Image (spheres, grey):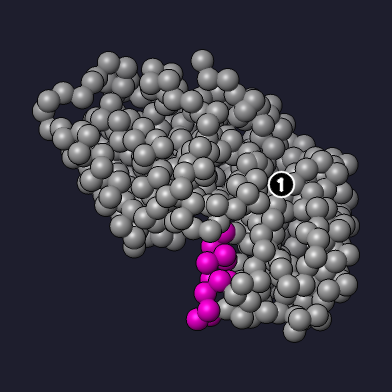
Amino acid sequence: MLKKAATNTALLLSLIMALSACGSSTSGNQSEPSKDQPKETAKAAESQSPSNEKVKIVFSQGADQTEGTKKLIAAFQAKHPNIEVEVREFPNDSSQMHDQLVTILGGKSAEIDVVNLDVVWPAEFAQAGFLLPLDRFIEGDKIETSKYLKGGIDAGYFNGQQWALPRYNNAGLLYYRKDLVKEVPKTWDDLLKQAEQLKGQGGTKYGFVTQAKQYEGLAVSFTELVASYGGNIIDDKGNVVVNSPEALKGLKKLIQISKSSAVPSNLNTFTEKETLNAFIEGSAVFARHWPALYAQANDPKVSKVVGNVGIAPLPAGDARSAAALGGWLAAINKYSKHPKEAWEFLKFAVSAEGEKIIAVNSTQTPTYLPLFDDADVQKASPLFASRDFVNSLGSAIPRTITPQYAKISSVIQVEVSKAIAGEQTPEQTLANLENQIKQAVSK
């Protein structure tokens, strides 16, 4: 049996270990997944094996502008000539993709076999009865989940079962100006101190920039800070534990950062876009962002800080460095007419060979950890060869693993925004979060 370390550490905040170093979480008070799985589907999943007759399966994901997916499918079909894979592309807007998938899978349609899921969707989709459990496949083929990014495995685990496996992940990173920073800060206190001291040097306007607007990014920031001080939103038994001394420390630190002289006065308007622009324009000493910033910060066509871009794990609180997990996982539609063939493709996609194809051709961060020692993968992106980046991935934490994640995130955004604006105390904020999150998970 798969051994899972109960971790719902992430509010989680997915926010990134990592990206950072990322067991599994179960939510004891959640209702069981739908029991209406057709007997024929269950039987097929148990006993059906690929035959010599050609079968077509459909794989859904967001649009891929690179050659990665084409090469992945070509390599798979070369090994499995009896399985044809058709790609169905959805909008890259995750909200639109989510809604379309809910409509399709909620209608018990078999039109999709393998589906890409955002890291915050597996629990919701599993609870709704959309997915086929993967445990028997994983055990039967002896898939070593310990060799994958822990946060990615955790994100696909819910109510005692593995519903999805990670294809590529990312996590929050600390970016800094190598020409200004002599010693990378290890704690949030160190970061604030250096940010205040270095602000204004080297043409900078700000010491630190991050995401603090009332949107998903703020929920991620809150999750990361709370986790770094040892707190959580919902524990591994499904209990709402956000109103804790540890969470209070994390929230107070987030408020302190937001009010610091080192950050922009309008930090509450900053999303990833504003954070990126401030850093590549040379206006910020430090920035919290995702891996996507790295390439743009080193592009001489758009960046003023080329050659001076450093990366490190996010600073630690009392407990640890905690970066929210981002990325995508693969799962199987419970109503697929070809579950065994779907598993063969999913297994290949998350294998060392499959993830290497995507890493090299699409520069998506692999989740199979041994690939970070592969020379071809390291050549694909400087990030993949960076020890700091790999360490950040290792500590990545998934956002709160619950079918009600969207509701919880919305509540966090509203209440934390009020706290940052000084409209309510940190203590009142956590009390409000506790009450509202309990209501959300009880429905």
Is 29 located above or below residue 443 in the figure?
A: above
Which of the pair 126/285 is nearer the observer? 285
Query: In this figure, which residue is indicated by the disc labeled 1?
Result: 322
Which of the pair 134/188 is nearer the observer? 188
Query: x and y percent of residue 393 in the render?
Result: 61, 46
Quadrant containing the C terminus is top right
Q: Which residue lies furthest to the front in this view?
A: 375
Which of the pair 321/97 is nearer the observer? 321
Q: Residue furthest left?
A: 53
- Residue range highlighted in magenta: 291-302
Residue at the spot x=43%, y=20% of the render? Answer: 142
Q: Callout 1, which amino acid? A: Ala
Left or right? Give the position of 225 relative to 117. right
Is 339 located above or below residue 233 in the figure?
A: above
Magenta-span inclusion, residue 300? yes
Residue at the spot x=12%, y=25% of the render? Answer: 52
Magenta-span inclusion, residue 204? no
Query: x and y percent of residue 382 in the render?
Result: 53, 58
Q: What element carries label 1?
A: loop
Residue at the spot x=80%, y=80% of the render? Answer: 201
Residue 154 shows in this picture: yes
Is 145 located above or below residue 62 in the figure?
A: above
Left or right? Give the position of 148 relative to 76. right
Q: Specify few, some or many for label 1: CA neighbours under 10 Å numbering under 14, 14-19, or 20 or more.
A: many
Query: x and y percent of residue 129 in the render?
Result: 43, 32
Left or right? Give the position of 248 relative to 349. right
